[in-house]
Amino acid sequence: MARILSIDYGTKRIGLAVTDPMQIIANGLDTVHIKDLHAYLKNYLTKEKVETIVLGWPKNLDNSDSASLKYVQEFYHWLLKNFPDIPVFKMDERFTSVLAQKAILESGIGKKARQNKGLVDKVSATILLQNYLDSKRMNTL
């Protein structure tokens, strides 16, 4: 089997998470500065076999498009153009940052580590990916 890659796209940093090859566990992979994202993904996707990309799709609480959606849409089209053989699944990312901050706080790590915004992005991508895996499993039961 191949991995599933999750992307929490932000205007400054992008959180990445990936499954193990058996697609059982979601793990934080990295946080990448936006200017480095394209090169990072091209490098990663040539080295690792990825079956699906899960892209966080920003929505407002009322389900309307968020202001940041235009940036995510541009990136979505870049993914489709550059990796046409890898399906990209758009997944609602509402509350992932809040859940990530809560998980980090409850993990017991120190205050200085909790202030690392990149950690929140990586954990958000992990939560997004775990939600995808859970929904995939629910549909196969």
Image: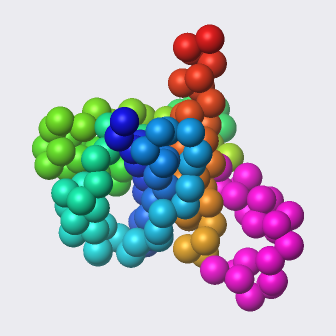
Taking the spot 28% from the left edge, 68% from the top edge, the residue there is 40
Residue 75's place in the image compared with 132, above or below, is below
- Residue 70 in the image: state x and y as whole percent: 35, 48
Magenta: main secondary structure: helix
Q: Is residue 68 visible?
A: no
The residue shown at (49%, 55%) is 17
Q: Check the image and report above or below for 112 versus 102.
A: below
Magenta span contains residue 40: no
Residue 89 in the image: x percent, y percent?
A: 39, 33
Q: Is residue 127 left or right of residue 17?
A: right
**Front residue of this view, candidates 68 and 6:** 6
Q: Position of residue 49 (x, y in %)?
A: 28, 47
Mark count: 0
Query: Of residues 3 and 67, which is closer to you in this image?
Result: 3
**In the image, what residue occupies the spot 31% across and 44% down?**
50
Looking at the image, can residue 101 be seen? Answer: yes
Image quarter where the N terminus lies is: top left
Quadrant housing residue 133: top right
User: Quadrant of residue 141 in the image?
Assistant: top right
Residue 115 percent location from the top left of the image:
70, 81
Question: Quick one: which residue is furthest to the bottom in this view?
Answer: 112
Residues 66 and 30: in front is 30
Identify the residue shown where x is 56% and y is 39%.
24
115 magenta-colored: yes
Rendered image quadrant of residue 113: bottom right
Tell me if residue 121 comes above or below residue 124 in the rendering. below
State the scheme by which the image is colored.
rainbow
Q: Is residue 137 above or below residue 107?
A: above
Magenta range is: 96-116
